[in-house]
Amino acid sequence: MKTAELISKAAMLLIAALSVIFIALSASEAEPMADGSWTANIITWTVVVLVIGLGLAVISEALNAILDTKSLIKSVIALIGAAILIAIFWSLADGTPLNMIGYEGDQNTYGWLKIADTSIFTCYFALAVAAIAIVASEIINIFK
């Protein structure tokens, strides 16, 4: 097994173990969500794991690009395609503030709603692509 794979698996297991421990500690409280502090801690932990994952993905792609220029071209094409899709979803997003009775937060603004709509459209697109890929692979396997 390559050293990089070993380090990757060890890091993944460490993050998973810390996540399980963190959730178990939050669930062991008498009323873990009563004051919202555990919810904030879990959201913070999720963001930390997301940032670590994204950082490692960028570092991994940078190393792959240095070692293999063909994969660099494919990665650039994929990034350009993703940027075009996100730009299309951004243009489709409606940022009209919502009339929500009892809501006093500050995220009901044009910018936040555009980001939320863009994220939702991106998730819908990813779901559709995944569903099509599942159905297509099953159909291809039937005819093999």
Image (tube, rainbow, N blue to C red):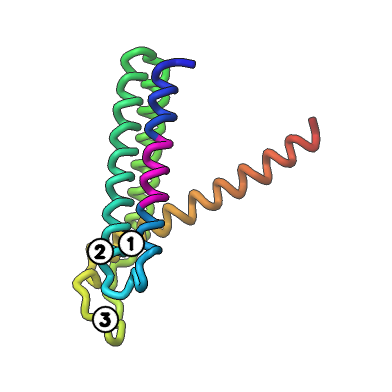
Residue 6 x, y percent position in the rendering: 43, 23
Real-space CA distance between mark 3 and mark 1, rounded to the nearest whole angstrom: 17 Å
Callout 2 touching callout 3 (CB < 8 Å): no
Badge 2 crowding class, 10 Å Cα cut-off, few under 14, some 14 to 19, many 20 or more, is: some
- Between 95 and 55, the one lying in front of the other is 55
Q: Secondary structure at mark 1?
A: helix
Q: Earlier in the sequence, mark 3 or mark 1?
A: 3
Real-space CA distance between mark 2 and mark 1, rounded to the nearest whole angstrom: 6 Å
Q: Secondary structure at mark 2?
A: helix
Residue 38 x, y percent position in the rendering: 30, 63
Residue 13, placed above or below residue 99? above
Residue stretch rendered in magenta on the structure = 12-21
User: Mark 2: which amino acid?
Assistant: Trp
Residue identified by numbered label 2: 112
| Predominant secondary structure, magenta span | helix
Q: Residue at x 80, y 34 (%)?
A: 143
Q: Secondary structure at mark 3?
A: loop
- Of marks 3 and 1, the one in the foreground: 3
Magenta region includes residue 43? no
User: Mark 3: which amino acid?
Assistant: Tyr
Q: Earlier in the sequence, mark 2 or mark 3?
A: 3
Q: Relative to residue 111, is residue 91 drawn left or right?
A: right
- Between 56 and 104, the one lying in front of the other is 56
State which quarter of the image contains the C terminus. Answer: top right
User: Mark 1: which amino acid?
Assistant: Ala
Q: Residue at x 55, y 46 (%)?
A: 129
Disc on res. 116: 1
Res 140 → quadrant: top right
Residue identified by numbered label 3: 103
Badge 1 crowding class, 10 Å Cα cut-off, few under 14, some 14 to 19, many 20 or more, is: some
